[in-house]
Amino acid sequence: MTTEVIITDNSANPAPLGLLGFGLTTILLNFHNAGLYSLDTMILGMGIFVGGIAQLIAGIMENKKKNTFGFTAFCAYGSFWLSLVALVVMPYLGMGEAPSKVAMGMYLLMWGIFTLGMFVGTLKLTRSLQFIFGSLTVLFFLLALGDFTGNHVITQIAGFEGIICGASAVYTCLGQVINEVHKKTIFPL
């Protein structure tokens, strides 16, 4: 005789954590890109712990929920933040040369192409996720263009666009949490 065991997943929604990690870190880095302050350990620390590790945790939790999109997005962008910090820190530790502007442009272009593909995936999801991924695609392409051309104005424009992108992720995070707590739609998503 075989006994069927049904396991119910009662774990929390990991998406708000991932969105918060992405959103806050994106805003702070893009304040730098917009020219409001220099790149420093505040951004690097956020990149490692909030943008990187928190998103990886959220992605792993999305896997448990069988959400391939969330798993891929949060693990990929968590890894993006960790790799970005590594690209900044490794040369200071004597672990290779700093990437050239062309190399950084290619790095950002590849992330833009990946993000464009993920944007297509959002077309069956909420408008807020469509906005996040659409604006992130534009951000990566603008940053790549800024590096390829060396045009600081393009990077500054990207910075302001990135602040909007990050803020939309924070909005979506708060919307998911508050809507769940109140059991009704307070923040349209």
Image: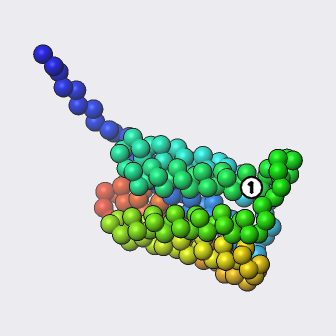
**The one of 58 and 118 positioned closer to us in this rendering:** 118
Q: Coloring scheme of the render?
A: rainbow
Rendered position, 86 above or below 114: above
Residue at x 76%, y 74% (from the top left corner): 36
Residue 127 x/y as whole percent: 38, 71
Up-down: is 118 above or below 86?
below
Q: Nearer the viewer, residue 24 or 129?
A: 129
The answer, for residue 45, to whether it is visible in the render is: yes
Residue ID at (60%, 46%) = 53
Could you tell whether 164 is left or right of 182 in the image? right
Secondary structure under badge 1? Answer: helix
176 sits left or right of 7 in the view: right
Q: Position of residue 51 (x, y in %)?
A: 61, 54
User: On the image, which quarter does residue 44 sit in?
Assistant: bottom right
Residue name at image x 39 percent, y 40 percent: 64
Indicate the quadrant where residue 106 lies. bottom right
Q: Quadrant of residue 180?
A: bottom left
Q: Residue at x 27, y 32 (%)?
A: 7
Q: Is residue 72 above or below residue 158?
A: above
Residue under label 1, please give it.
Answer: 87
Q: How many marks?
A: 1
Front in this rendered view, residue 104 or 74: 104
